[in-house]
Amino acid sequence: MMRILSVASECVPFIKTGGLADVAGALPLALAPLDIEMRTLLPGYPQVLAAIGDSGKTVLDVGNLFGGSARVIEAEAAGLKLYVFDAPHLFEREGGPYLDAQKRDWPDNPERFAGLSQIAAMIGAGKVENWRPDTLHLHDWQAALTPVYLQAEKSKNKPATVLTIHNIAFQGIIDAGLLGRLGLPESGFTKDGFEYYGKISALKAGIVFSDRVSTVSPTYATELLSAEFGMGLEGVLRERSTDFSGILNGIDLDAWSPPYKTARGKEKYKKHLLSETGLPSRDGPLFVVVSRLSDQKGLDTLLEALAAIFPHGGQIALLGSGDPDLERSWRAAGEVNPDISVRIGYDEDYAKRLITGGDAILVPSRFEPCGLTQLYGLRYGTIPVVAMTGGLADTIIPANPAGLARGVATGLQVYPNTTDAWARALERTCLLFKQKDEWRRLQKNAMQQPVGWDVSAAAYRSLYKSIGNPR
Ligand code: ADP
Ligand code: GLC
């Protein structure tokens, strides 16, 4: 039995802002049949504390940490074995995990997530009773200082460390003045360590000091080595290239299970959706989008290209929230065009209704480490139309002439990621939609794609096993 501690700043079903939460929640369940016990360390946000109620027990008293008392609670909830880093002064507050109600970073994010990383190192060093992990699996910058703290732990048999990068856009850049307060060693504050242009980079620390580094698709792993996608860390990643790989995310097949066996069953759900959104009935495809509204997601480009669908009876329903400018421009488009429905907000049930009733799902991302919504689309026969980048490139078989002729295509890929190319692809999708046999074939292929966790869980097992002697 291999023991892994997963360290994450969000996790379904407790708290989620994006795909990281889905991955953190699904991986332990996917690994269990492979004889891997994964426990998960999470910050004690109100949602996490509410989920465990008073079922937990204190397994580590940390004492004073950054101006308040901290402890680790062991508990079980939603089928997951949890360690909860309970520090009310750091986590018990209204707002999101990273941002306050005004969408500003919490000013004490460095302390909050350095704290999380310190606790991970303590558990790694055997400081909780009865359980000692062989490997720490660290997700994103919020957990990436862990190997630095682990070095300072006086313990034999230190665990191995794996860092998974879910998104290089978030690097955890911290003012150098906090070095002492965060308990980071001066000796690590160098170009070969976690110093980054005069600041501390948590993500760089993880890249430099973890035994293995992974990201969430093979294509993104390659892209990250280039200046275009590496966002300043491409050189550091290149140094680690022999220990760096891409493993695709899967989706939870129980949570995302279409209410129909074949895509013909969609019709009734599309009708419901049209009446729910107030969109008129037309003979073109209903496109859907479920997305954070951030620059990464390319929804500005999509909006510029959208006019291409209306002459063909196309319609669109978007659900998303985030950047105020993007919210405003989509909302404005929805107000003047009866074939555009826009809902600003976060709503998991509505997201599911969109993917169930929609004909095609659009993912125009400028970069996309993996992406989950195109995988939902495949599973529901909701044809993905995606930018050719990152995990989007790895999960869709494009409807190019060869893909169609051989009957293997599952979606459309758009390249280059420009307004013109999107307009052409949207128009093509509308025309394909009207070739009923061709479209059914696409849907059938899409629904047969393996989008669960099986293959990737085995790949993570190989990765954990590949670390014979941790450094
Ligand atoms: P990212 O993590 O970059 O946001 P992913 O595609 O990996 O992108 O994951 C996004 C996840 O968040 C998916 O599960 C998606 O359904 C969900 N999601 C995004 N926006 C919303 C929203 N407004 N309402 C409900 N779910 C959303
Ligand atoms: C990030 C990425 C997304 C990926 C998710 C889970 O948020 O933006 O592409 O699917 O993490 O790994």
Image (spheres, helix red, strand yellow):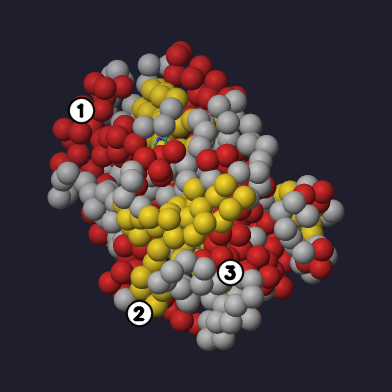
16 horizontally vs 187: left or right: left
Residue nearest the observer in this picture, 306 or 300: 300
462 horizontally vs 351: left or right: right
Q: Residue 104: x, y in percent?
A: 63, 32
User: Which of the two discs, 3 and 1, labels the residue nearer the N terminus?
Assistant: 3
Residue nearest the observer in this picture, 206 or 294: 206
Q: Is residue 173 above or below residue 91?
A: below
Q: Residues within 10 Å of mark 3 (few under 14, many from 20)?
A: many
Q: Provide the residue designation for mark 2.
A: 1
Q: Residue 444: x, y in percent?
A: 23, 54
Q: Which mark is residue 347?
A: none
Report which quarter residue 335 is drawn in. Answer: top left
Report which quarter residue 319 is drawn in. Answer: top left
Residue type, numbered disc 3: Val
Residue 235 seen in the figure: no
Q: Is label 2 in a helix, a strand or a loop?
A: loop
Residue type, numbered disc 1: Lys
Residue 86 seen in the figure: yes
Q: Which mark is residue 213?
A: 3
Residue type, numbered disc 2: Met
Q: Provide the residue designation for mark 1.
A: 271
Q: Is label 1 in a helix, a strand or a loop?
A: helix
Instruction: Name the residue located 20 percent from the left edge and 27 percent from the top edge.
Output: 271
User: Which of the two discs, 1 and 2, labels the residue nearer the N terminus?
Assistant: 2
Residue nearest the observer in this picture, 60 or 48: 60
Q: Of all residues shown, which one is farthest toward the bottom? A: 468
Instruction: Name the residue located 56 percent from the left edge and 65 percent from the top edge.
Output: 122
